[in-house]
Image (cartoon, rainbow, N blue to C red):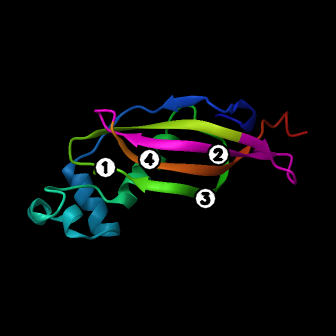
Amino acid sequence: MKYFEEFTPGDAETTEGYQVTAEEIIDFARKWDPQPMHTDPDAALASGFGGLVASGVHLIAMTVRLLVTRPTHASVIGALGLDQLRFLRPVRPGDVVRVTIECLGARPSSTKPDRGVVRSRVTLRNQRGEDLLTYVDALLVARRPDAAG
């Protein structure tokens, strides 16, 4: 568990890779974003994407899962928001994605001594190192119990 005190601007880490399958893309999209380029391989071929692609909502879900299941995940109390969210390239079946998270800043809460706000740049990349999704997040992160005073 990574506490507020351990966040330093400029520090970055990258998650393990995750391989995306066609079945996962279709299953997720049928439930949460039922559009033909995500649910129907034949229709996706005729789309501007030229094949099946993962939904943007699915990319966000994959990113969050990779972040919260890494060994050094943050002691998050809650999310304050996402800024500058961009979908840059499609994710296709067979792609292996990884997330890089870079700390942009950390400030203690002015009203609650047991927490602070951490801002980070989050980037989802494929196996070729191409940026797929980026955003800046702001999270409430717990301080170490012995540091909260």
Determine if the magenta segment contains residue 110: yes
Classify mark 1: helix, strand or loop.
loop
Where's residue 97, x and y in %? 34, 39
Amino acid bearing label 2: Arg
Measure how far apart labels 3 and 1 are at the Cα level.
22 Å
Q: Earlier in the sequence, mark 3 or mark 2?
A: 3
Classify mark 4: helix, strand or loop.
helix
The residue where tag 1 is placed is 89
Measure how far apart labels 2 and 1 are at the Cα level.
24 Å
Residue at image point 81% right, 37% down: 145
Amino acid bearing label 4: Thr
Pick the front one: 3 or 101: 101
The residue where tag 4 is placed is 63
Residue at image point 9% right, 64% down: 46
Amino acid bearing label 1: Arg
Instruction: Please provide the residue range marked out in magenta.
Output: 106-129
